Image (cartoon, grey):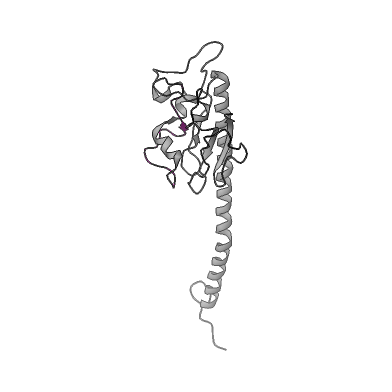
Amino acid sequence: MVPRSPNSSGMTLVELVASFAVVLLLAGIVVPTVKARIEAARIERAERDITVLGSAVRDFWRANGVWPCRDGAGNADGLDVLVTGATVPTSNPWSSSTDWWSRVSGRSDVLWNHLGRNTPGGSSSAPYPSSRSQGWRGPFLDATPLDPWGRPYVVLVGAGHASPSGSDPVHLVVLSAGSDGEITTPIQLTTSATSTGVIAAGDVGLLVWRRT
């Protein structure tokens, strides 16, 4: 019998190769499962965040009698979109350029300026009116975080304009672009748009209100 020449671990080369193959096989099974669970957890967190944000936007409307659309100059219908996070992005945070980004880069503000403090546009010079019977009595939420993929949630407040025009959205939604980073939910501009299936597949969102 030919004596076996053990290596430092006491295993033959064949045994090492076999062990390595088993490790690779297990990794091929475990890694996708772990990734899927992590992604599912991110979606669940986004859904929770969106529910909280949507409730806060509704609470704002109940208290103020208007949706949070005021800009820093005091124009009641001055904004189309509010974003979470500390600042309005200066470059497109999503994987494609859509009407959403054009509205964020043109007519937007951070959500915190409206629901966290009464400073539209980051200024205290044109606040929402406040009175004993009705007015701004926030904060309406504790924080406005980015979504689990590091991008802002968007709130399409243009639907809540007091005097809507043909270029104003119909649906007031809270939305995350999801894992692919692309917002595929369209901005509907006509009241004939259906209120069902508003949030497109791949996005995570909530319909807060619909203009009729």
The spot of residue 182 in percent (x, y) is 48, 46
Residue 11, placed above or below residue 90: below
The N terminus sits in image quarter = bottom right
Residue 32 lies in quadrant: bottom right
The spot of residue 70 in percent (x, y) is 45, 23
Residue that extends furthest to the bottom in the rendered view of this protein: 1
Main SS, magenta residues: loop
Q: Is residue 87 magenta?
A: yes
The spot of residue 78 in percent (x, y) is 43, 25
Residue 6, placed above or below residue 140: below
Residue 49 lies in quadrant: top right
Residue that extends furthest to the right in the rendered view of this protein: 196
Tell me the residue at 57%/53% (across/down).
36
Tell me the residue at 59%/42% (across/down).
44
Looking at this view, is 103 or 174 the one in front?
A: 103
Tell me the residue at 53%/82% (across/down).
4
Q: Is residue 166 magenta?
A: no
The C terminus sits in image quarter = top right
Q: Which residues are magenta?
A: 76-95
Whether residue 157 is visible: no
Whether residue 111 is visible: yes
The spot of residue 19 in percent (x, y) is 55, 70
Looking at this view, is 51 or 79 the one in front?
A: 79
